[in-house]
Amino acid sequence: TNNLIKNNTGNPGGGVYIHYGTVTGNIIYNNNGGGVYIRAGTVTLSSNFIINNTANTGGGVYIGESPNLTMHNNIIADNIASSSGGGGLYDNDNGDDYNFSIKYNSFVKDTANEKGAAIVYRRRNINAPLQYNLFYKNVIQSSTTTGPISNTVYISNNTSPIINYNNIIENSASYFIYNENTYLGNSLDAENNYWGTTTESEIQSQIYDFYDDNSLDLVDYDPWLTEPNTE
């Protein structure tokens, strides 16, 4: 708690490596190997500044195994995934742990080489909250503009987070959400977000789903917020 953790190198976890426990109120800055590596166990990651960290994958935060994770109220900014995806957060585990909550975070100007400028999401918990977050000016470096590469949040197959009440503003990838879920007639819940616009066609243009590739499931974005969420 309340530490300055900077200019370190480690693989994995240049700044922090945690297996059970709480990381709160820290500045985690300019570490090589990623800002935070979460291995497993019950982990709380809250109220940290996770800034300007670099890793091949998961520049800000990397989730390696199966934690029960509460990740709330962090600033995750200017992090880089230099080789792959998840500039802000890469969840490499496809488990179905009881608690997996990502809320009230700010993903700002994070960069990935390909897919998930802010987040690559693989957790299989049904209805796990991905809510009340800010996604602002996140960047994909690849010149490829297709949906599977150029996206801010990459939702992997067999995952169904609840993506609500987020503010989505000025991200530079071709799409905000890429929904990899195979078509089963279901819809990914992305209702009640502010998309930086109130024009439906402009919202639709930020989503890659069934309407772009009919082997994929739909994203349900309606209703949407008409102004930024202030909660």
Image: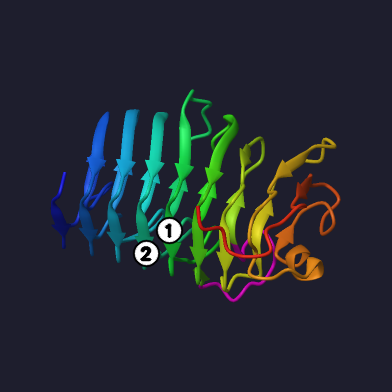
Residue named by callout 2: 77
Q: Which residues are magenta?
A: 141-151
Q: Element at badge 1?
A: strand
Q: Quadrant of residue 22?
A: top left
Considering every residue shown, the one lying at the far top of the view is 98
Residue 147, magenta (yes or no): yes
- Mark 2 and mark 1 residues within 8 Å of each other at the beta carbon: yes
- Is the residue marked by circle 1 packed among few (<14), some (14-19), or many (20+) residues within 10 Å? many
**What residue appears at the point 74 percent right and 52 percent down from the top-left corner?**
221
Considering every residue shown, the one lying at the far left of the view is 3
For the image, the number of numbered tags is: 2
- With respect to residue 4, does 188 lie above or below? above
Of mark 2 and mark 1, the one earlier in the sequence is 2
121 or 128: nearer the viewer = 128
**What residue appears at the point 67 percent right and 51 percent down from the top-left corner?**
192
Name the spot of residue 7 as percent of width and height, x first: 16, 63
Residue 107, magenta (yes or no): no
Q: Which mark is residue 114?
A: none
Q: Which mark is residue 106?
A: 1
Estimate the spatial distance between the alpha carbons at disc 2 and disc 1, rounded to whole Å: 8 Å
Name the spot of residue 37 as percent of width and height, x first: 31, 44
50 or 149: nearer the viewer = 50
Name the amino acid, label 1.
Ser
**What residue appears at the point 71 percent right and 56 percent down from the top-left corner?**
224
**What residue appears at the point 28 percent right and 57 percent down from the top-left corner?**
49
Quadrant where the N terminus is found in the figure: top left
Q: Element at badge 2?
A: strand
122 or 172: nearer the viewer = 172
